Image: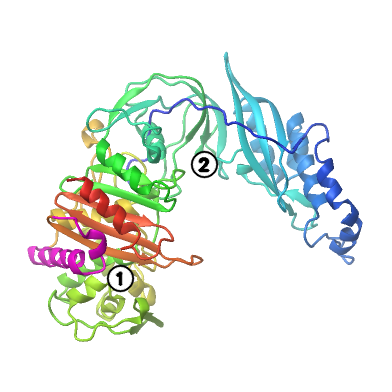
Amino acid sequence: MGSRRAAAGRRRTKPAVVGSVAAVVVAGAGFGAYAMYGGGADGEDSARTKSAAAGVKSGPLTAAEVTSTAQRFLTAWQKGDVAGAAAATDDAEAAKALLTGYAKDARIKDATFTAGTPAGEKVPFSVKATVAYEKATEPLAYDSALTVVRRAGDGEPRVDWHAAVVHPELRDGDALVTGKAGDPPVKALDRDGGEITAAKYPSLGTVLDGLRDKYGKKSGGTPGVELRVVRGGAAGDGKGSKEAKGSGADDVADKTLLELSKGTPGTLKTTLDPALQAAAEKQVDGKKGASVVLLRASTGEVLAVANGGHGFNTAFLGSLAPGSTMKVVTASMLLEKDLASVNEKHPCPKYFSYGGWKFQNDDKFEIKDGTFKASFARSCNTAFISQAPELEDDDLTRQAKEVFGLSMNNWSVGVSTFDGRVPVQSDAQMAASLIGQGGVRMNPLNMASVSATVKSGSFHQPYLVAPSVDGRALATASRTMSGGTLSALRELMSYTAAYGTAAEAMAGVSGDVGAKTGSAEVDGQEKPNGWFTAYRGDLAAAGVVQQGGHGGDTAGPIVAALLKAGG
């Protein structure tokens, strides 16, 4: 992965406006209306939900159980009775630790909790409080929710304990801390010197947080005082977050919730292009599952990154099966091993079985007497799976690492990234990995880099902050493709952009172009994730639309629009 904590100039957080409420929890009051709903049936329910043999309550929770348990928890918490509130949960030890820190470490006082209308076992509530640190104070307001469950063992109703009960931004293991920010704010600039803000570019909120974590102490600023989420339980002295320990979707930057006093920001220049970033924002706007990245192929500079859902940077940190876009990497391997040739006949049957699994193509199509070019352009799964018997288990892993710089966990982009995963697998899972399923995981940053490698002829690690800023080393690949392999791969992608599954999306994208579509099946989803990766001139881009369906129809137009915007 590369350098982890990244940072950004954070704007002053304004307390949320709390709307109308159903009841206020004070001294045992506030749940009378709810208790009334379950009152008549409670005696009957208690006989039904108690085990006569063991005295263990079971069965669905009654309305009275839900409201009384929520009342007990919220009333004790509001009174400052941490032990009493913790006892109302199903994990008293964890609850006590976090609730103690709420007052001690987060410096939150005078909190009042207002309950909303229960929805089954879930009870929403709003919080109004004050955060105080030395002479600085600020009001705090937010909404949260709790869920009541039956405790294992005795079936007693208890609050299902998770850190998100205390604040929705918390994950289990996180903590709330108020103090001098460990990282000064950062004034992030685009490549033209304009300031980057989350107000201007909503997708960049998490990126700005990451830039601050990485460069706050290096950019010349001074810290302010803030309430923040400290990831992974590394709370205590309020002097800063822990160093990130690894690569991947779990490596998320600390988050500022409320600023009590401003720090002095340092200045940090990025590689983002303001016009292209604005175009990327426009393309994902209103598309919650959409993410896209645009690179300069010859250098690896990140010119734009955007996510339709702004709470998580899927474009950099996502870990998703890339589907048939992975066939770019697989095709390069088959070409190198003389297991395929662009214009030679290549099998594309309806089905191919390997390792105990029966693989098929979309809509069970087949190409009779077709070439490898035709199979690549139409995204024939069995054309790739049929070569599994000729491969070693680690062939694809080595190709991804040695040529495309993937799955090495050493990218140093300037913010946290997931650098792709292509594990060594065997039998059916190895075969599935050839078409971007199995254990293969990627994100738009990774797949944009794949197209950039094809276009430029060699791997250039993507970066958001120039390595000259902090003297860090960028990741490298150990070898490049031969000239013949590279030329053949470009021909495959160019043909796909003109006549294959990418043709409709790439219509009107002129110049030296190449593309590949993909669809990745995910358990539990009605529609697959749609993928698209492409290049045009010195630009390379990739995008995903989760639960979007075919990549050419969903991610394709997003990527193509960015390539057009790049001129």
Residue sitting farthest toward the front: 508
Residue 507 or 414: which is nearer the viewer?
507
Q: Please name whichever residue, 511 or 4, is drawn nearer the observer in this view of the structure.
A: 511
SS at circle 1 = loop
Measuring 36% from the left and 36% from the top, which residue is drawn there?
Answer: 201
Q: As shown in the figure, which amino acid type bears the numbered disc 1?
A: Leu
Residue kind at label 2, given as amino acid type: Gly
Looking at the image, residue 174 sits to the left or right of residue 306; the answer is right
The residue indicated by pointer 2 is 232
Residue depicted at 57% across the width and 36% down the height: 175
Label 1 crowd (10 A; few <14 / some 14-19 / many >=20): many
Q: Which residue is mark 1?
A: 434
Report x, y in % for residue 405. 24, 54
Q: Which residues are magenta?
A: 482-510
Q: Please count the marks in the image.
A: 2
Above or below residue 207? Residue 43 is below
Q: CA distance from mark 1 to mark 2?
A: 35 Å
Extreme-left residue of the structure? 483
Q: As drawn, is 277 to the left or to the right of 452?
A: right
Residue 463 in picture, x, y percent from top left: 26, 42
The circle drawn on residue 497 is: none
Towards the viewer: 351 or 39: 39
Is there CB contact under 8 Å for labels 1 and 2? no
